């Protein structure tokens, strides 16, 4: 019996040990499965990220849903039902534009040998008026030398004290650059070609060379450098006006300045743009950090306050987020939509459908907000440039507006409830959870437009304003000096703001630089009169 008991105890101990080992390996197996599940989720997310990057580099640049049989939009959606762009086949045309403001030239065409002759008697036909044939628009471009001569007068009387010298000549017109080679019109052509049309300097030289004028690069650069200070007072006035508008959109894009700067390890600078109802203001900075927003808004670290406050629409870049407690910081819904668009790259059908549902919800918010704005827009004041709107308190008090506002509030609340519900789920793919977590983090800024309808839902206006920087970057890669980069930002500010107000930019710059020449090669005295919304053609150095 003693042997049986010992054997039993031995087997019992082995059983306990084996059970412990089994539980241990079961726990290891469970941990391994969880680790494998996490690794699979990470691999899936990385594959989707690679697909997203491939789409960015090689796919369609537009974020619009395709229409047609291969569309990614749900069946029956607006994207599926949209018509092709342009005039529709079979529709009535609007006819050719008359263009009565263009100067008219008449070209008389005759037979090369003159009047035809009668085939019987040989007498020539006599003239009997003209017959119209067709009209065409002619583009002519020429370069010439302008030789300035001053009329000279000589005393015609014999008075001993005429009060003037015996011979006197009219004073020459003022010159913008002393001993300069180029006229004001030529300088403006160069500025617009370089900074508005984004032409490389060598292509500008080539254009002029085709017209018979060889203007070297040094002449162009030297001229630009001399006129650059003349725009500084106008830039200051535009900055003050932009700050005073108290409503802004802000964005930035990379720019290159090929100058070695101390404590900076690369040539990468940043072109910032601030869009207000009146101004598109560009800032060139070596940094993408908080320094530019702090300087623009007049941030005081001692009081932790900004000198200029108001609603600011931005993307979700971290440099803006310190302004959340200082300004009314609104975030862009287009960037949220872009998250869902990019989530479809490399995703399975279920995840694509999930993203499409969220895209449709965002589109619904845009439609409801646009309907509300149409009912509350101030129709008695001049319309502000998009996306800014002027609301009418009386129209906002009407029942139709209140109904549209309530529909938007309910849609936003439903939107919030949906992302909260999905975010509360335990098993959520990494990519989807990241997008929903971003929604949660930025929700207060995303919904500012609900209670403040004058705040736009996106910062498309600033992204479109920054696009010219991207075009210039692709054409001539950046600026070769700091002064050139600063002139680039100044010219963008002036030309883009002038275009925003519907001005003839060429004539505006010609008038401004002529006023500088008349003012002793300095900026006009009354600079406020030269702001684009105050400008009138044919100005003097004293303004309109």
Image (spheres, rainbow, N blue to C red):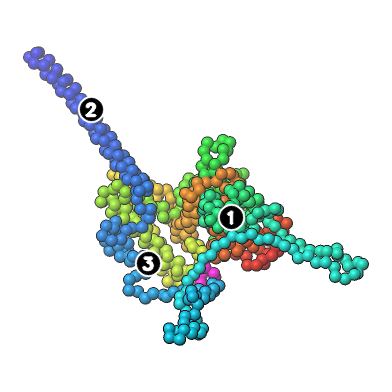
Residue at image position (68%, 56%) is: 176
Where is residue 35? Give x, y as percent: 28, 35
- Name above or below for residue 269 compared with residue 445: above
Q: Are marks 1 and 3 in contact (CB under 8 Å)?
A: no
Tell me the element at label 1: loop
Magenta span main SS: loop
Q: Which residues are magenta?
A: 378-384
Which residue is outermost to the right? 160
Residue 382 magenta-highlighted: yes
Is 309 on the left or on the right of 72, as rendered?
A: right
Where is residue 150? Give x, y as percent: 74, 63
Q: Looking at the image, which is closer to me, 22 or 46?
A: 46
Is residue 297 among the parts visible in the rendering? no
Which residue in the protein does label 3 denote? Answer: 86
Residues under labels 2 and 3: Cα distance? 70 Å
Which residue in the protein does label 2 denote? Answer: 24
For disc 2, the neighbor class at 10 Å (few under 14, some 14 to 19, many from 20) is: few
Where is residue 254? Give x, y as percent: 49, 46
Residues under labels 1 and 3: Cα distance? 41 Å
For disc 1, the neighbor class at 10 Å (few under 14, some 14 to 19, many from 20) is: some
Q: Looking at the image, which is closer to me, 194 or 240?
A: 194
Which residue is outermost to the left? 1
Quadrant of the drawing holding the C terminus: bottom right
Residue 213 circle label: 1
For disc 3, the neighbor class at 10 Å (few under 14, some 14 to 19, many from 20) is: few
């Amino acid at each position: 019996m003693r042997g049986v008991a010992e054997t039993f105890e031995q087997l019992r101990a082995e059983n306990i040990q084996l059970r412990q080992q089994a539980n241990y390996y079961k726990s290891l197996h469970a941990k391994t499965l969880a680790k494998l599940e996490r690794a699979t989720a990470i691999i899936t997310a990385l594959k989707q990220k690679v697909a997203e990057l491939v789409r960015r580099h090689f796919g369609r640049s537009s974020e619009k849903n395709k229409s047609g049989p291969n569309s990614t939009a749900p069946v029956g959606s607006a994207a599926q039902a949209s018509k092709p762009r342009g005039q529709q086949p079979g529709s009535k045309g609007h006819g050719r534009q008359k263009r009565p403001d263009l100067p008219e030239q008449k070209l008389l065409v005759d037979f090369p040998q003159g009047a035809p002759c009668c085939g019987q008697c040989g007498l020539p036909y006599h003239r009997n008026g003209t017959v119209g044939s067709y009209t065409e628009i002619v583009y002519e471009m020429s370069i010439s030398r302008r030789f300035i001569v001053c009329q000279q007068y000589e005393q015609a009387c014999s008075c001993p004290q005429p009060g003037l010298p015996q011979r006197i000549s009219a004073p020459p017109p003022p010159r913008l650059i002393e001993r300069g080679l180029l006229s004001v019109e030529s300088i403006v052509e160069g500025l617009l070609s370089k900074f508005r049309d984004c032409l490389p300097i060598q292509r500008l030289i080539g254009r002029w060379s085709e017209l018979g004028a060889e203007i070297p690069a040094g002449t162009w650069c030297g001229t630009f450098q001399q006129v650059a200070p003349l725009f500084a007072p106008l830039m200051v006035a535009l900055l003050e006006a932009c700050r005073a508008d108290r409503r802004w959109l802000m964005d930035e894009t990379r720019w290159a300045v090929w100058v070695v700067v101390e404590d900076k390890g690369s040539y990468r600078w940043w072109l910032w743009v601030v869009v207000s109802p009146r101004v598109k203001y560009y800032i060139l900075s070596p940094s993408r950090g908080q320094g530019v927003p702090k300087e623009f808004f007049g941030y005081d670290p001692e009081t932790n306050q900004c000198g200029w406050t108001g609603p600011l629409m931005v993307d979700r870049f971290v440099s803006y987020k310190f302004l959340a407690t200082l300004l009314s910081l609104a975030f862009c819904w287009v960037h949220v939509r872009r998250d869902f668009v990019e989530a479809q790259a490399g995703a399975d059908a279920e995840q694509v459908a999930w993203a499409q549902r969220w895209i449709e919800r965002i589109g619904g918010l845009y439609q409801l907000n646009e309907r509300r704005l149409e009912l509350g827009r101030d129709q008695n004041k001049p319309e502000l440039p998009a996306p800014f709107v002027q609301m009418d308190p009386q129209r906002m008090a009407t029942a139709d507006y209140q109904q549209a506002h309530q529909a938007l509030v309910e849609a936003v609340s439903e939107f919030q409830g949906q992302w909260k519900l999905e975010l509360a789920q335990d098993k959520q793919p990494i990519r989807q959870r990241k997008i929903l977590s971003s929604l949660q983090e930025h929700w207060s800024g995303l919904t500012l437009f609900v209670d403040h309808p004058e705040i736009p839902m996106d910062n498309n206006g600033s992204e479109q304003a920054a696009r010219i920087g991207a075009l210039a970057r692709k054409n001539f890669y950046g600026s070769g000096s700091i002064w050139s980069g600063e002139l680039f930002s100044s010219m963008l500010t002036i030309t883009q703001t002038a275009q925003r107000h519907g001005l003839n930019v060429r004539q505006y710059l010609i008038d401004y630089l002529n006023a500088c020449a008349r003012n002793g090669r300095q900026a006009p005295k009354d600079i406020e009169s030269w702001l684009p919304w105050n400008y009138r053609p044919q100005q003097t150095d004293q303004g309109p």
